[in-house]
Amino acid sequence: MNRSQRSVEDNHAAMGMACTRVIERACAAAGEIANAPSVFEPALDVANAGVLWALPALLSNGLLRHLDCLFSIPKGFYSLTHIFLLLAFMALNRIKSIERLRYAPPGEYGKLLGLDRIPEVRTLRAKLKILAQPEAVNEWCAELSRQWMEDNPEAAGILYVDGHVRLYHGGQTKLPRRYVSRQRLCLRGTTDYWVNDQTGRPFFVISKPCTAGLLATLRGDVVPRLLQDVPNQPTEERLRDDPFLSRFTMVFDREGYSPVFFKEMWDEHRIACQTYHKYPKADWPVSEFSEVVVTMPHGHQVTMRLAERGTLLADALWVKEARKLSDSGHQTSVLSTAYRLPAVEVGVYMFARWSQENFFKYMMDHFDIERLVQYGVEPIDETIKVVNPAYRALESRIKSKAALLSRRQAAFGQMSLHEELRDKQIAQYERKKGELREEIESFEKELADLKTCRKQTVRHIALGELPEEDRFAQLAPTRKQFIDTIRMIAYRAETAMSIILRDVLVRPDDARPLLREIFTSDADLIPNQEEKTLTVRLHHLTNSMSDKGARFLAERLNETEVEYPGTNLRLVYKLVSDSIPPGQEF
């Protein structure tokens, strides 16, 4: 059946658009069946069926892992497997919100699940409300994170941590303001701290409606979890025998620069830290730098001019300092307590930090990680420390007065008396300079009073001590966390497929655009009950090079011999053959 025939059949369905499995829907409504099975029938030109090419990667990244022991929904037509597969397909097809599912053909997406149609938006919302229980979602995320690290222990040895501000423009609560570097403004929002590997693949994310900064989050939330989850950590005996051996390495930007924190992490946990030097000293002699060819995490090679020294920080901690010399003569300084790493690897790991910045941009553009998934707020622990509004107001007034004082002092210093001035001009000059002196003295007194007042004001107070008009709640986090985990699985699946395609494409950067084209392409679904296969036959792409990449990818996918979840049908991937005679599509 082609798409035109399916469109007519779906439009004339007795129970509503594309509801053609009437008996099973009636039984599900009466509670006589737990859920409808996935049943595939021959179908031509199924819209967006190319997304089924991502199914092996989705399953290998844990999409359906731990579902039966953590989640449950009441009896109905749609099963847990159907809901999770649909959410993953939506992410890969860039359907960025549940509401946008209204404009997707329900019957066509139903064919991807082996059903007559997908659930309506209100039905899917109701399912999400049941699934997004805090304990289940937290445990699922933790299990997936541990499994991803165990599957790739080398990647888990170098961890990138960075904060991303998720802006909030609603009116349900007044979230604290924080600096947003991409907009260079202080805006209201929630800070999400992501932990990724060298290639940008995420392990987990921690959301903080109010935060004391990156270092506080590392101490209180990230490090305890990493100590528990990172695999292949050296034993205590090995750490005692080798005083320069570390458990793993954390890489972050200049916000995390703190010699005290570096020493604390090394002395208490033997965790290595790496970041840019916030206060580098004089440039090193150019003769110290040597040209080396380094391999970046994605496999491409670059040439760098690197040098290495030992540096004493705050008279308390020796660190490894590596510098990169650019063509313009600028020296970028990197500090690391990973003493066993040579300068080349220190440079590679530090400059690969842009993979995380690229991850944030890609997730905002394609997966809309900033979108508000659930309306509503929840209370926050009132013992959490936040900035005192009175202290913040004093800080603002001090900065304003200091700026005014600086301008008056500059104007006073620029005034000079020339000999050729007449008596009247001299009088005007003296009067103006006297007025400036009075203003300067007034501003200096006000500034001194404000600084005295600031010293007497507590900087941080408990949330419960805030005035009523300044109190705030947190955005309801659980459903957002659940959807973000689905998006993380989709991103990791897409990344795994892009790595395969890099081996055959002339331009490796074309891998992700090609995958997006595949996911949104039409395909034929051809089940064969005798051979127990489900062939997903993709239509031809935009050019011969894309077809070549798709054929190469199909060969690798067929090697996995993955069965469609809930069936005994092995997935087979191929492109439509140019030699198929008309009328003999099956």
Image (cartoon, rainbow, N blue to C red):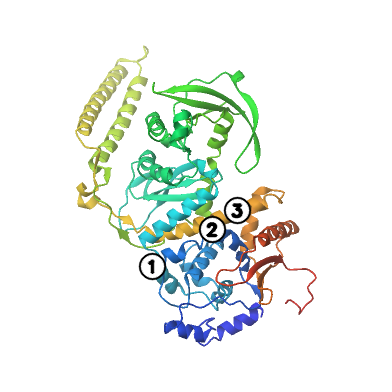
Quarter that holds the N terminus: bottom right
* Amino acid type at mark 1: Lys
Q: Is residue 60 left or right of residue 429?
A: right
Q: Is residue 174 left or right of residue 237?
A: left
* Amino acid type at mark 2: Ala
Whether residues under marks 2 and 1 lie with C-beta atoms below 8 angstroms apart, the answer is no
How far apart marks 2 and 1 lie (CA) works out to 21 Å
| Residue farthest to the front, as pictured | 237
Q: Position of residue 73 (x, y in %)?
A: 41, 71
Q: Which residue is mark 3?
A: 496
| Secondary element type, mark 3 | helix
How far apart marks 1 and 3 lie (CA) works out to 30 Å
The mark that comes first in sequence, 2 or 3, is: 2
Quarter that holds the C terminus: bottom right
Q: Residues within 10 Å of mark 1 (few under 14, many from 20)?
A: few
Identify the disc placed on residue 129: 1
Q: Position of residue 140 (x, y in %)?
A: 43, 58
How far apart marks 2 and 3 lie (CA) works out to 10 Å
Give the residue at x 60% y 23%.
Answer: 289
| Residue 331 visible in this rendered orientation of the protein | no
Identify the disc placed on residue 114: none
| Residue 550 visible in this rendered orientation of the protein | yes
Q: Position of residue 551 (x, y in %)?
A: 72, 60
| Secondary element type, mark 1 | helix
Q: Quadrant of residue 387?
A: top left
* Amino acid type at mark 3: Ala
Q: Is residue 339 above or below residue 9?
A: above
Q: Which residue is mark 2?
A: 490
The mark that comes first in sequence, 2 or 1, is: 1
- Of circles 1 and 3, the one toward us is 3
Q: Is residue 303 left or right of residue 414?
A: right
Q: Residues within 10 Å of mark 2 (few under 14, many from 20)?
A: many
